[in-house]
Amino acid sequence: MSDPRPSLLVRAVGSGLGSGYAPVASGTVASALAALIYLIPGCERPAVLLPLIAITFAVGVPLATVMERHYGHDPAEVTIDEMVGMWISFLFLPKTLPVIASAFLLFRVSDIVKPYPARVFDRMSGGFGIMMDDVVAAIYANAVLQVLLLIDPVRQILL
């Protein structure tokens, strides 16, 4: 039998402000919400984004653990991990709409494909594994975009 239903606060935050309850593609919905939050002026500054990522990750691990006990392994309802991943995907990149769209697409693909070691974390039980598979996917997305921006024709398109 699963644990009792988590509190409203745990569900609200752990589900990425409710995005985890979207009827389809809850991870994509949460990623889009994280991108909208990133559009807030000043959010791109590392002095804002790094603490946002760290705090959300620290809060997300126990919340994801609680929600997993109720909903089952790595449930679709937990999307706080996608929000952290999306913000990591944006780190140290220019804040332009083409870059944001590219980071979004690269993160979603990486999160779905789960390149090593993301798949290892995805198989783990508990909030740490839930959060870390998205962190790894985001690092890949960010690294690919950083390299693409070194290629002048790509840079011209995205900036």
Image (spheres, helix red, strand yellow):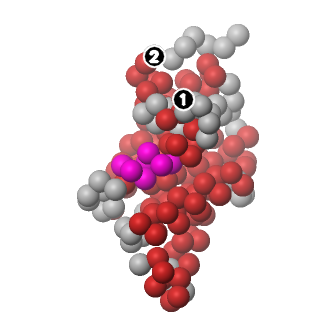
Q: Nearer the viewer, residue 22 or 140?
A: 22
Verify whether residue 32 appears in magenta: yes
Residue lying at the far bottom in this picture: please name it: 152
Residue 150's place in the image compared with 73, above or below, is below
For this view, does 104 lie left or right of residue 13? right
Q: Quadrant of residue 13?
A: top left
At mark 1, the secondary structure is helix
Q: Is residue 24 above or below residue 35?
A: above
Whole-percent x, y for residue 7 in the image: 45, 16
Chain-order first, disc 2 or disc 1? 2
* Secondary element at image label 2: loop
Instruction: Name the image quarter holding the C terminus.
Output: bottom left
Q: Dividing the image into 4 quarters, which one contains the N terminus?
A: top right
In the depicted structure, whether residue 37 falls above or below residue 125 = below
Q: Which residue is mark 2?
A: 7
The amino acid type, in three-letter code, at marker 1 is Tyr
Q: Which amino acid type is marked by label 2?
A: Ser
Q: Residue at horizontal 50%, vertical 32%?
A: 15
Q: In the shown orientation, is residue 109 left or right of residue 22?
A: right
Residue at which label 1 appears: 21
Start and end of the magenta stretch? 31-37
Q: Can residue 135 be seen?
A: yes
Q: Is residue 59 magenta?
A: no
Give the residue drawn at x 26%, y 58%: 41
